[in-house]
Amino acid sequence: MTHEPASLFAALAAATEDRIVFDLTGIEDRYETLRRELPGVVVRFAMKACPVDEVLTCLARKGAGVDGASPRELEQALRAGVPVARMHYGNTVKSDRDIADAHRLGIRDFATDSLEDVAAIAVHAPGARVFCRLATSGEGALWGLSNKFGCSPSDAVRVLESARDKGLTPSGLSVHVGSQQMTADAWHSAVESLADVLAALGRRGMSLDHVNLGGGLPALGYLDRYGTPLDPPMDKIFAVIREGMRYLREVHGDHLEFVMEPGRHLVADHGAIRAHVARLSERRRPNGERQHWLYLSCGKFNGLYEMDAVQYRLVFPTHHDAECVPAVMAGPTCDSDDAYLPDYGLVQVPKGLASGDPVWVLSSGAYAISYMTQGFNGFDPLPYTWTSAPGRTSGARE
Ligand SMILES: *Cc1c(COP(=O)(O)O)cnc(C)c1O
């Protein structure tokens, strides 16, 4: 289980207005743990999970790089102090202009999954290094990313051969097992298809320098739809990844390096939202049943975009040990999607909650800033602040 450090709770308690708070020390510690669990793996933070300058800067100072998905993202990472050599363009979807802009920024590593994209990279980023993304099933993940990205093993061989023929450097293979991947098996299957492609490439005289095992590592602090902790099997996942790396080196040679692009895993548990109660009300539904609804100041469009897949742990700091009632949680907008789904378990909330009372939404640090709308229905996106443990100099720019 995850635990929130005193500095995060102190920052939440000190906030008198809504905001999202990031705990930079927690993010640094999660990065260190990942490096310890997977020795030698190069970590490139998938910045779409938290495109916040201070987070990028603090990870860069620890040695992390960035996986960017557009020239704008890559530019932001550069401004935040991430060295260009530690960045790659990880999106297989890009226009000619995107490729040229990234090349101009100094980006030399590009993800790809099609002959068309390789041809465009050869023209607009001549001489670049390309790694080919293999499709995965996405099984076992809360958000499978299976359809839009990646190609089959045989297409990967064709794509990398074509890259070589066009003067590019075929440098690697990548996978993404789906976001919030809850099973170690997913990495096991990914390693098997990576091994097949590496062997096929070897037979054609092609040797790659790295394998990118993607993102997908889970957050630790989510609840499932019914309110039970998800509790992902981290030890098992790390063990399977370590064993997979050993095996792939056996197949392809000891020179093979490993990259990962965690997003959610690094930031989700180290961001929390200070929101407030709009209203706790009781309504009779068409079937006659009475039901409590907790309407919060934040929801799907300002911080909790992923509320249709997980529940969040809530803290009601002004109502400790109060008598509770079961309620449906919802955001403030006039959109009916801005609520926990009808099949969700109900949330226990203090019966005496009044409008304006603070509510802390834990483990909400991933994909919060990036998915916030520009004030849908007139509800502002959340401002952010950051905190770090006393005595620890964080990497944030002052
Ligand atoms: C979104 C994304 C990631 C991060 O995924 P998480 O599940 O947040 O770890 C990594 N790599 C690529 C290419 C992505 O698009």
Image (cartoon, rainbow, N blue to C red):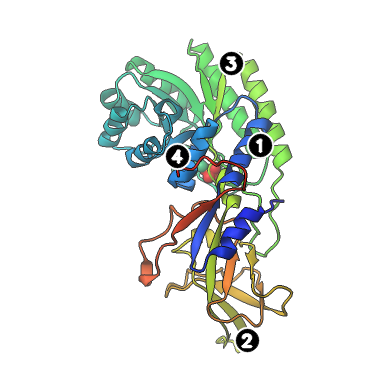
Q: Which of disc 4 and disc 3 is earlier in sequence?
A: 4
Q: Earlier in the sequence, mark 2 or mark 4?
A: 4
Q: Is residue 193 above or below residue 392?
A: above
Q: Looking at the figure, which quarter contains the C terminus? A: top left
Secondary structure category for the residue under label 4: loop
Q: Earlier in the sequence, mark 1 or mark 3?
A: 1
Q: Which mark is residue 289?
A: 2
Mark 3 secondary-structure assignment: helix
Residue extending farthest to the front is 391
Residue located at (56% from left, 32% from top): 213
Circle 2 SS class:
loop
Which residue matches tag 3?
A: 252
- Please report contact status of discs 2 and 1: CB closer than 8 Å, yes or no: no
Label 2 crowd (10 A; few <14 / some 14-19 / many >=20): few
Mark 2 C-beta to ligand 1 under 8 Å: no
The residue where tag 1 is placed is: 33
Q: Amino acid at mark 4?
A: Phe
Query: At 26% from the left edge and 24% from the top edge, which residue is drawn?
Result: 123
Instruction: Tell me the residue that label 4 is attached to.
Output: 149
Marks 3 and 4, how far apart at CA: 24 Å
Q: Nearer the viewer, mark 4 or mark 1?
A: 1
- Above or below 364: residue 252: above
How far apart are the alpha carbons under marks 3 and 2?
63 Å
391 or 146: which is nearer to us? 391
Q: Mark 1 Cα within 10 Å, few/some/many (few <14, many 20+)?
A: few
Q: Is residue 204 above or below residue 49?
A: above
Amino acid of disc 2: Glu
Figure label count: 4
Any atom of ligand 1 within 8 Å of the CB at mark 4? yes
Residue 358, position as x, y percentages in the image: 57, 71
Rendered location of residue 84, percent (x, y) = 40, 28
